[in-house]
Image: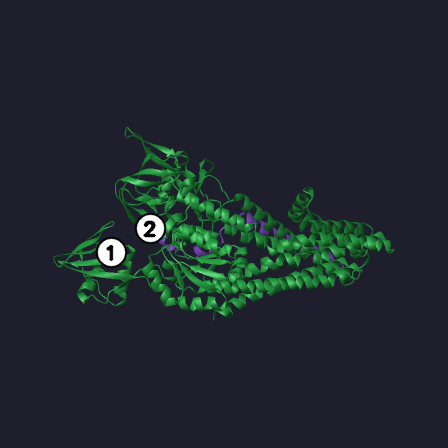
Chain colours: A purple, B green
Amino acid sequence: MTGLAFLIPIALGMGLLGLVAFLWSMREGQYDDMDGAANRILIDDDEPLEEDA
Amino acid sequence: MNAPAILDTGNAPLLTTTRFTVPGMKCAGCIGKIERELPKLDGITAARANFSAKRVAISHDPAVGEDALTAALLGLGFEAQPVADNPLGVEVEERKRLNRALGVAGFGMMNVMLLSVSVWSGADGATRELFHWLSALIALPVIAYSGRPFFASAWMALSHRRTNMDVPISIGVILATCLSLYETMTGGAHAFFDSAVMLLFFLLAGRALDAEMRTRTRAGIGALLGRMGKSASVIAPDGSTRRVPAASLEPGMLVLVAAGEALAADGEVADGASAIDNAMLTGESAPEPVGPGAVVHAGAINLSAPIRVRLTRVADDTAIAEIARLMDEAGQSRSTYVRIADRASRLYAPVVHSLALLAFAGWLIAGAGWHQSLTIAIAVLIITCPCAMGLAVPAAQVVASGALLKRGLLVKDGSALERLAECDVALLDKTGTLTLGAPRADIAALDAESRAVALGLAQASRHPLSQGLAAACLREGVQPAAVADVREVSGAGLTGTWQGLAVALERPEGADQALATRLRIGNSAQTITFADPLRSDAAATLAALRAEGITASILSGDRAAPVEAVARTLGLSAQAEASPQAKLAALEALKAQGRRPLMVGDGLNDGPALAAAHASIAPGTASDASQQAADAVFIGEGLMPVALAVRVAKATMRIVRENFGFSIAYNVLAVPLALFGLVTPLIAAIAMSVSSLVVVANSLRLARSAKERAR
């Protein structure tokens, strides 16, 4: 039963970690532009480098 | 909240952020262009595009004004309007609050369940007490936070002496929590924190899905009005000009519209010749030539040269404002359309209260202690919670919309599926709906030399006729002739020289030849005609619609002869030369007969009809106004998504009815058991959750059925 003293805090901590990650990602606007995120992958990053050079 | 602008400079506090709506943002390339090119300009630090909301947030030096930023965006090829603040901010905030509550409830549910499972599997004595206390510690803040949407709504209803679905939920959750606290404190065997938190989690999941669908639908109207010019340069009688805000413009004023400026009001060109981009109103992507006397509408963009415009209708009287108003009204009358779920749960909520109260009173009278009576009453409240019923409609709608989206049809509103399923007669516009709306040239009569010259000229222009001609030539494998000095005269045609001969593609005389161009080589001239071909699967789609019991007919604003021809080919009845008012009247007449018309159309003239129809679908090539007015938009060259939409809508309603049937059957079975005290609150919560999951799983079948049917 002493194992519980470790396991329960660990379980709670992991759950809290997930919750904090979710709330953080929402505050950071990760879900604000779902369609944009899908499109951004198509943007060619090489182009500005060439132009800057 | 909007996407935050990414700042990486040290003087961040000195920057201001201005937001623009940029409706022309259509692809990844646009995002890249805006975000890459804007910061290269002086005074602009960063630009961040939000593709979903079609907005760009620019952080810049306060010295750079809105006008300069608008001009900068226009320089990149994007028409933009500054937004004072986010009109949809309230709804976005509401959705975020739901999502946060859902996240918290999910965390609470998982952890409380973890502890509960140990209690069920035999923990007792001090361990059980510890677990109950831990559960209470987790559950109380979670319930206080995640329950707020329900408590607030229930309180609202009660303070207006009404009852809604949230009242039994709130009472059940609060009672279960209080009783569990009491149990925990007195070291009792049962605590129901798990039931309460699980209930909140599943209900919030349903709410969040629903809110997601709703916010998507309303995004458009603001964007439409944002296209109107915000101000205009009014020319005073003495020739001087001053900027006047759109709201202060008056009919009769003479305004100067610079090239690249959006019109702020409707009017008539008084002086000057130019080309205007009317894409927003008509869906016609080609610039429209205008000269003195031509009518121009607010929202159109003057492309080539400055013109003077005498205003006729301003502010709320403009054609575009009228369309926005029509759409808004139509949307409102639809949202008051009583949704089945609301109807059912409105009747249901009072029944739940009375049953729980009855159970409590009954068991108390029968001699059970108040503690046992209360436990039974809570079980009744939870098990009869109309959760499955609440999910029955949104779950099916979300799955069906997702499945249709993959087949090229975007459904804008969950209730649109309900209305699509009810349609029994279809009215189709001709141009752009039954036909592709893009002209295809008939070049069979041209010899090889003429074809080469035609292609040499046509490929230099972006006019739709030129593009249709170039496409037809390229399909035949024609090599373009080397035409020199190609010049495009707006509204007149293309000229050039080829082997010393003057060659031209020009507008033929006579208004009858609208869809034709004349190819002139030296002194000889040939007329090339264009046809607007039917969508290849038009006949198959109409047959599929017939199979669903929907009779179709054509309702077109086009001239009688071409409409007749299409109607004969497809075997439909047709009404031609219908004005927007006539289209509206035709729909109203059908509605008065008790029919439920489905309108499919693309033009601006279809806008009111689309809004007035029981359900409406527009092709993706339609004007923005029509796309906004329609319930659904289909993409691609096929017309089949229209028939598919009706079929899937009917399947959706079938699933919704099944879901309702199931939740009613579940309640009929479960309520007596709970009333007779055979169910603990925990089993009640599990049964309730399982019933919700069954409803969701049943709805997921729609994803597959849409696919199978399409084959």
Q: Left or right: B453 with respect to B165?
A: left
Judged from this view, the residue extending furthest toward the right is B367
When asked about the image quadrant of residue B437, the answer is bottom left
Viewer-proximal residue among B180 and B476: B476
Q: Which mark is residue B388?
A: none
Residue drawn at (49%, 45%) of the image: B4
Residue drawn at (44%, 52%) of the image: B585
Q: Residue at label 2?
A: A51
Which chain is home to disc 2?
A
Q: Amino acid at mark 2?
A: Glu
Residue drawn at (65%, 46%) of the image: B153
Viewer-proximal residue among B178 and B220: B220
Q: Left or right: A37 with respect to B457?
A: right
The x, y position of residue B43, in whole percent, is 38, 39
> How many neighbours does mark 2 have within 10 angstroms: few (below 14), some (14-19), or many (20 or more)?
few
Q: In the figure, B451 relative to B88: above or below?
A: below
Tell me the mark number nearer the camera, choosing from 2 and 1.
1
Q: Residue at label 1?
A: B460
